[in-house]
Image: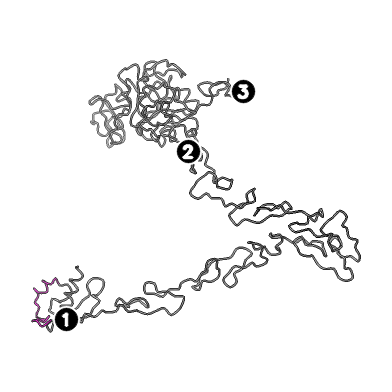
């Protein structure tokens, strides 16, 4: 709409000097400055009163004062001129008009080769073939669908290398002759021309007689096995490829297809799949180690990862830690000593049951793995203990082992079966308190009473600061330090531990409580459940190596599901 109005104004200014349509007219020169301003100085009138017609925008109105269309062939040699006419046509039959320019269109038929008429080429020929008249032709000898290399010929539907070394005459092994004998020595005997020859055909039904002739001819569908001098009947009934039973083949398959034992050609197909059968008795690409093929897709085997959902949230590197995994998730069946899975191991933050409804801690571990029993179980499988559990892991996190406290942050010994204590939780990570090193190493995190060190402290019980926020009189004050966090008071699982309050301050994000250990301060291990499957950790899972001494090698015994030297 805007362009239409501007165009009308330009035409009126340029063409209305003599009046228009019989009405009164005002010469452009009589337009005063106010008129020009009223028209917005849109290019129709100069401020000095002179009339002019000016293009508006990037193109003209396309008509003259009489309303006729003005052809536009600027920078164009062909194609429409905008007024129903043409700017020209391309003279060369191989040219086509594109955007007003004559461009060369390559002339290439399917399977053609050589020049395309535009300075390029249509395609090349395979090795041992030449481009002749726009088509690929064998340079030497054609054989079924192949071009034989130089020096070879086609024999029995295959390229054959003639063998005439040391021979003057006789068969070249490829249906040809190594030479003809002269009249003075007309007999070919074992590749040499001789004066006379005694045919050697005893026990032979076919093949050379040693004197340039043959001992006999084979019947239809038979071939002569020259070395033995016997006729062999081809076994190719219903076969299109494969051995014919006489040292030859029944036919060749097309490129990309393979010959099955049944003598039929089959083209393997792996389109849209990563693995599995190729339709011809073979397999598509194998899956990487630790994965298996399911429905044509390589999927991770949880038994390799250690977590039931096939993803790790700590001890991320399977290669570095093949026997221990930190698995995130949730469960609502209380306690850490439930040794049996109850929801088909479908728990885990990426599992089919991420909220852990009806699940135990064991449901977070893959089949063939168990919740780590304690410090020794962890150390057997991780010589560095918990040192690298948080490498590339999400913080904060607490991953528990199946062990509790004997008091004063000391850990109970590893045990299978009834626990020695149900007090507190211990494990690895960066959330919680540091336990007693002497009795707990390599475990480095503890929950404290009612798990208060892995939760948010009640308001006012624990306040955390950056060291640069402390009063300057505080001994821990460090000017400009807004990276190191200090929580106060130091007691009660606050300052000497790292509860959620610490990470709320450090990360600038509030973390809701994921851990609930009940109300009995002596039985946290019997009552603990966890929500928020993607937050704050889960359990430590250790690989099962044995169930009894019989599973171990000579001189070893099964200790805590691990084969140990006696």
76 above or below 209? below
Q: Taking 522 as reference, is 36 above or below it?
A: below
Looking at the rendering, the stretch of residues picked out in magenta corresponds to: 20-40
Of label 2 and label 3, which has the lower sequence position?
2
Closer to us: 290 or 170:
170
25 in magenta: yes
Is 35 or 500 nearer to us in this picture?
A: 35
Labelled pair 1, 2 in contact (Cβ < 8 Å): no
Inter-mark Cα distance, 1 to 3? 112 Å
Q: In terms of secondary structure, where does tag 2 sit? A: strand
Q: Is residue 541 above or below residue 82?
A: above
Binning the other alpha carbons within 10 Å of mark 3 as few (below 14), some (14 to 19) or many (20 upward) gives: few
Q: Quadrant of residue 102?
A: bottom left
Distance between mark 1 and mark 2 Cα atoms: 80 Å
- Please rate how many residues cluster around mark 2, counting C-alpha atoms within 10 Å: few if below 14, some from 14 to 19, many from 20: some
Name the residue carrying label 1: 15
Q: Is 238 left or right of 95, judged from the image as shown?
A: right
State the separation of the CA atoms marked 2 and 3: 33 Å
Q: In percent of the image, x 26 and y 71: which residue is there?
A: 58
Q: Residue at horizontal 58%, vertical 46%?
A: 282
Q: Which residue in the rendered view is the most extreme toward the bottom?
A: 18
The residue wearing badge 2 is: 300
Pointer 3 residue = 554
Element at badge 1? helix
Disc with the residue nearer the chain's start (1 vs 2): 1
């Amino acid at each position: 709409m805007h362009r239409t109005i501007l165009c009308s104004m330009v035409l009126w200014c340029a063409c209305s000097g003599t009046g228009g349509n019989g009405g009164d007219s005002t010469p452009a020169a009589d337009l005063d400055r106010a008129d020009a301003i009223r028209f917005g100085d849109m290019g129709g009138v100069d401020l000095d009163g002179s009339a002019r017609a000016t293009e508006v925008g990037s193109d003209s109105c396309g008509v003259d004062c009489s309303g006729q269309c003005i052809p536009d062939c600027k920078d164009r040699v062909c194609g429409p001129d905008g007024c129903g006419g043409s700017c020209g046509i391309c003279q060369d039959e191989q040219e086509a008009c594109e955007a007003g320019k004559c461009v060369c269109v390559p002339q290439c038929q399917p399977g053609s080769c050589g020049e395309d008429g535009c300075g390029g080429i249509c395609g090349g020929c395979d090795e041992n073939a030449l481009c002749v008249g726009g088509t690929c032709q064998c340079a030497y000898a054609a054989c079924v669908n192949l071009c034989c290399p130089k020096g070879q010929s086609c024999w029995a539907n295959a390229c054959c290398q003639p063998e005439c070394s040391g021979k003057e005459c006789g068969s070249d092994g490829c249906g040809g002759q190594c030479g003809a004998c002269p009249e003075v020595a007309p007999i070919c005997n074992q590749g040499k021309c001789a004066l006379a020859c005694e045919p050697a055909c005893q026990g032979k039904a076919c093949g050379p007689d040693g004197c340039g002739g043959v001992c006999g001819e084979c019947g239809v569908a038979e071939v002569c096995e020259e070395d033995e001098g016997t006729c062999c009947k081809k076994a190719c009934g219903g076969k299109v490829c494969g051995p014919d039973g006489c040292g030859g083949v029944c036919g060749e398959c097309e490129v990309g297809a393979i010959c099955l034992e049944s003598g039929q050609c089959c083209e393997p197909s792996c389109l849209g799949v990563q693995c599995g059968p190729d339709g011809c008795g073979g397999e598509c690409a194998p899956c990487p180690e630790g994965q298996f093929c399911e429905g044509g897709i390589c999927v991770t085997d949880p038994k390799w990862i250690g977590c039931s959902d096939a993803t790790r949230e700590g001890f991320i590197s399977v290669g570095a830690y093949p026997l221990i995994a930190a698995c995130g998730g949730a469960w609502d069946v209380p306690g850490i000593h439930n040794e049996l899975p109850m929801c088909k191991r479908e728990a885990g933050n990426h599992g089919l049951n991420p909220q852990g409804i009806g699940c135990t801690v064991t449901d977070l571990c893959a089949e063939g793995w168990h919740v780590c029993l304690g410090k020794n179980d962890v150390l057997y499988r991780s010589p560095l203990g918990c040192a690298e559990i948080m490498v590339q892991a999400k913080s904060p996190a607490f991953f528990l082992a199946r062990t509790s406290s004997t008091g004063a942050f000391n850990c109970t010994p590893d045990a299978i079966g009834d626990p020695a204590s149900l007090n507190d939780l211990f494990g690895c990570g960066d959330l919680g308190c540091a336990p007693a090193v002497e009795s707990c190493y390599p475990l480095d995190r503890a929950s404290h009473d009612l798990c208060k060190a892995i939760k948010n402290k009640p308001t006012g019980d624990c306040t955390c600061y950056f060291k640069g926020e402390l009063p300057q009189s505080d001994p821990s004050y460090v000017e400009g330090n807004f990276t190191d966090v200090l929580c106060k008071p130091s007691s009660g699982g606050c300052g000497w531990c790292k509860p959620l309050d610490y990470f709320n301050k450090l990360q600038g994000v509030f973390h809701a409580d994921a851990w609930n250990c009940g109300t009995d301060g002596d039985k946290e291990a019997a009552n603990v459940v966890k929500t928020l499957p993607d937050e704050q950790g889960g359990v430590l899972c250790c690989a099962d190596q044995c169930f009894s001494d019989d599973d171990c090698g000579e001189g070893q015994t099964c200790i805590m599901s691990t084969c140990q030297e006696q």
